[in-house]
Amino acid sequence: METPVAPPTMETPAAPPTMETPAAPTTAPHVLVIPFTAQGHTLPLLDLAALLAERGLRLTVVTTPGNLPLLSPLLAAHPATVRPLTLPFPSHPSLPIGLENTKGCGPEYFPIFIHALASLREPILAWARSQPDHVVAVIADFFCGWAQPLARELGAAGIVFTPSGVLGTAFPHSLFRRLVRRPDECGDEFTVAFPAIPGEPAFQWREISMTYKWFVEGGHREKVRESVRQNFLWNLQASSGFVSNTLRALEGRYLDTPLQDMGFKRIWAVGPVAPETDPAGTRGGEAAIAAANLSAWLDAFPEGSVVYVCFGSQAVLTPAVAAALAEALERSAVPFVWVVGAGSSGVVPEGFEARVAAAEGRGLVVRGWAPQLATLRHAAVGWFMTHCGWNSVLEASAAGVPMLAWPMTADQFANAWLIVDEVRVAVRACAGGFGVAPDPGELAAVIADAVGEKGRDVRARARELAAEAARATKEGGSSYSDLEGLVQEIRELC
């Protein structure tokens, strides 16, 4: 970070701006929204922004030229209340020229993006001070922790948006707060415990976020590493609270009492924030296949018989992993849609598509972005093989689709543990993590069993969770009430 603001210490935290100063608003409150430039982070924050705009708040959303198209649906839907603040993307010697989003990048790029984006602090500060209307709150992604002391300088409330669940947010903050290290004599089976979390969950070192492991193992230059750690400390020390894209039906156990690993902060659980439908199928970018065309293909299959396979915008499969997955899909004899990201498009085994197309047309490979919301809600889709990114978890949960959990990195192991062991809406497909190829025969058996009679109980629980998610976001529901409470507290800042 080039020009950091000295943070308060953990021992003597400075009091952040409170959200408890009632005043009758004379105009709609002005809120500054700062996303992190990754699809899985930007999209849910823009979904939240749409909900805030619907409730009468005025929003300015920070973006860069390459990410501006992601704002198009939001700007078109709320032209009077939402505007972009487009700033040049900060250059960094470790980032290719023109790269402004982590889509399709390996996880090693995340620390560099976190560090580089902190350079937006000064231009944002200058812009905010030049505005005739005061910014009363700053809602920033948890990878933009530098926005929390920025909010304090503006006399605004700083709110951390987490695109992960409570667990997925608490774990990295706990690690950077405690600076847990693996002993030199231990391997990837070394267990890391989280004693301050209800149930005291524990994970092996191989399941810990790569960003954190690079930090403690010296995987980046010191300036980048310290910038990443400071990012998480600012969230804990300088914010007024967290707003999380989660719901009580999934994480009520972790919302009942303030958590030390979340700085004992207030958490507004407002999810799922994604819309129920995406008619154009373009949420997050131009789809490689039209939603209507994919729906027509799915119409040929019985209810609940198709497995939808997608590992998000970040995962880049190795040839060995892709080959094992392809063989498992063939051996399972289960109909499937496999969405292959742009970064992995060249690893689909030669002849695979032709073979599955010839086998009664039971397999479809989509290369690029897919209309996921519409696909998950199609009656033929019975299971979702996923990397357990939180957006995918919530979209499947809202659609009532059980999951085949294949976590790879970041918060995904925590998410997989939650949905498999706690909520029971998923079964484990592969536990090896990023770059680990499963045994094709074992994976084929897992797929076939899930679609068959052995998956009945998990399918039933997934339908129950979907009903709970629908109730949560309707008037009187827990997520609806938390969202209304957040808006009311922001209004009271005027």
Image (cartoon, rainbow, N blue to C red):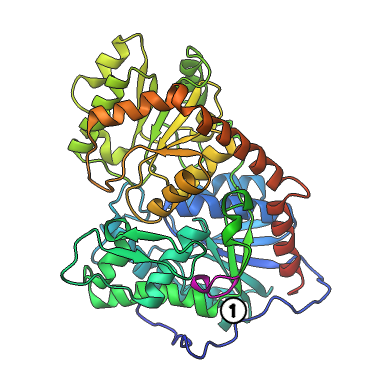
Q: Is residue 289 visible in the rendered structure shown here?
A: no
Q: Quadrant of the C terminus?
A: bottom right
Pick the residue in front: 130 or 256.
256
The number of numbered discs placed on residues in the rendered structure image is 1
Provide the major secondary structure of the magenta segment.
Answer: loop
**Res. 254 image quadrant:** bottom right
Query: Residue shown at 48%/87% (left/top)?
Result: 8
* Above or below, comparing residue 35 to residue 429 in the picture: below
**x%, y% of residue 441?**
24, 27
Judged from the image, the secondary structure of the residue bearing numbered disc 1 is helix
Callout 1: 10 Å neighbours few (<14), some, many (20+)? some
Is 476 displayed left or right of 314 in the figure?
A: right
Is 304 displayed left or right of 468 in the figure?
A: left
Pick the residue in front: 203 or 92.
203
Q: Quadrant of the N terminus?
A: bottom left
**x%, y% of residue 264?**
57, 74
Name the amino acid type tagged 1: Arg
Query: Residue shown at 23%/30% (left/top)?
Result: 440
Please give the residue where the numbered disc 1 appears in the rendered image.
129
Q: Which residues are magenta?
A: 258-265
* Above or below, comparing residue 121 to residue 345 in the picture: below
Pick the residue in front: 206 or 19.
206
**x%, y% of residue 142?**
48, 65
**Res. 448 image quadrant:** top left
**Res. 209 image quadrant:** bottom left
Query: Residue shown at 48%/18% (left/top)?
Result: 298
In the displayed orientation, state which residue is furthest to the bottom.
12
Query: Residue shown at 81%/76% (left/top)?
Result: 23
Please check the rendered image and state whether residue 161 is part of the magenta-colored stretch, yes or no.
Answer: no
**x%, y% of residue 411?**
40, 55
Q: Is residue 167 visible in the rendered structure shown here?
A: yes
